[in-house]
Structures are given as C-alpha cells and as structure tokens.
Amino acid sequence: MSTDFKVLVVTGSSQGLGEAFVKAYRERGWRVVGNSREIKLSEDPHYITVPGDIGDPAIARKVVQTALDRFGRIDTLINNAGIWRPGPITSISEELYRRVMATNLDSVFFATQAAVPAMQKQGGGHIIQVTTSLVEHALQNVPAVLASLSKGACAAATRGLAMELAHDNIRVNAVALGIIRTPLHEPESLEAKKSFAPLNRYGEVSDVVRAVLYLEDSDFVTGEISYIDGGRTAGH
C-alpha cells in the first residue's frame, strides 16, 4: 500500500467545523476519515465516512482502524465532536450528564488511545482538540458546568499528552473557541452574542480552520491552546 500522502481522522464531520476541516485537508490532498452519528456515504474515494456514536469506545476505535485499514496511517486526529448543553447544575439529569461526557470526553480518550500507537509506529503525528474558551473565562450568565468538566479535561489533557508524547514526535494542540457561527447556535441568537467578544463580533468557521491549519503547519508547536474567541479570554 502506497502511503505517499497524509491522513486525517476527524470526528463530528457531518456539518459545521468538522465538515470544514474535511474540505480544507482534502484541498491539501490529504486522505480523510470522518465520523458522525448520522453521516452520508462519501462519493469521494479519498474521504471515508464512518457513521456511529463516537462516544461509544467501540465506534471510536472503529473510526481509527478504518483509517489504518484504508490508508495505512494516521497523521492527524482532530477530536472535534461535541455537545453543547448549557444549564445550571441543578437542572442536569444523569442521562444528559453521561451523554455529554461520552461525546465530549470519552470519544477524545478512546480515539486518541487508538491513534497513538499508529503514530508512534510511523514516527510522529498530530492531535488537535476542539474546546471552549469558557474553560478559562467562565460567565456568570452562561452556566456551563458540563462544558467546564468535559472540555476543561480536554484542555488539561492537551498539555499532559504533549509532554507524554513529545519523545515520539507526536504533537498535541487545541483550539479554544468563543462564539463561532455554526449549526451549534441558532442564527437568530448570534446578534445578541456579539458582545461576548471584545472585538464585538462572532467568529466564522474560516477563522477556526485557519487556526487549525496554522497548528498543522507549525511543527515546533505542541501543548498550545489557541484561543479563537475575539479576545474574550484576554479580558473584557
């Protein structure tokens, strides 16, 4: 099997950021394996889709194994899948808690755990987490304990894994997002959310894609959390 190309695995790839990551890397000639709960069969032979709940460890491992079976390697894993369910802690059911943690955290652990041995074997790789700047800058009027628990753990793991895997030439970075215009937000709600950022606007998917491609190209950067939030983390 020829491997004169690079391979991306991206979770949550059916729409929004994940769909944009697929497009950006395919434009660079990368092969891609994408996953979402419900995702269309790809007509592109160099983009393979794997449907299923990425919060299920078996599905996370299947997505990674599909990349190895079809393309023989994994150069970058983007842990993009996520559920956003704000609300006060007293309103959160056990079922919702476990569903959010499975999608936001379990998927990251099990997909990363499956991808690392392949990256070690091939001599390097890159792992990118998609998290939220609410981890660093909580808002009193946006109770988001589930995001803090799940995405905060991903931010901590980014730095921890960057140190653990540095000797394997595996870089681990993250993008921490503010308000980005994606299907996560109702379109009519975006205008009111502009003030969350000192730049007084919401971000676009293209802003995040540029940040991810910067991290992709910056092979001396690891353990970095890039804040794509219009300055919210810096101050207000």
Image (cartoon, helix red, strand yellow):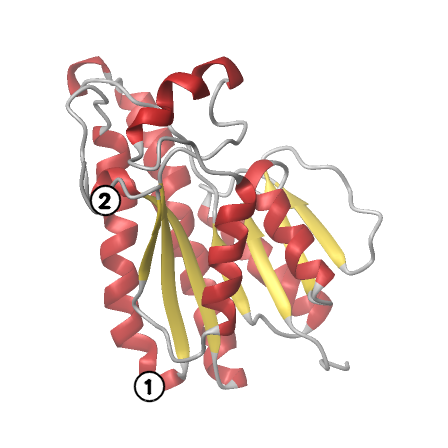
| Quarter of the rendering occupied by the N terminus | bottom right
Residue 204 makes an appearance in the image: yes
Residue type, numbered disc 2: Thr
Mark 2 and mark 1 lie on one chain; the one further toward the N terminus is 1
The label number, if any, that marks residue 233 in the structure image: 2
Determine the residue positioned at 58% across, 35% down.
37
User: Helix, strand or loop at disc 2?
Assistant: loop
Question: What is the distance, in whole Å, between disc 2 and disc 1 at their CAs?
Answer: 31 Å
The residue that label 1 is drawn on is: 167
In front: mark 2 or mark 1? Answer: 2
Q: Is residue 228 left or right of residue 44?
A: left
Observer-nearest of 79 and 221: 221
Residue 128 image position (x, y, % from top left) = 43, 59
The local crowd at label 1, few if under 14, some if 14 to 19, many if 20 or more residues have their Cα within 10 Å, is few
- Residue type of the residue flagged with mark 1: His
Q: Residue at image x 48%, y 42%?
A: 81
* Residue 137 sits in quarter: top left
Q: Which element is circle 1 on?
A: helix
Report which quarter residue 25 is drawn in: bottom right
Is disc 2 surrounded by few (<14), some (14 to 19) or many (20+) residues within 10 Å? many
With respect to residue 4, does 88 lie above or below? above
The image shows residue 205 at horizontal and vertical percentages of: 54, 41
Q: CB of mark 2 within 8 Å of CB of mark 1?
A: no
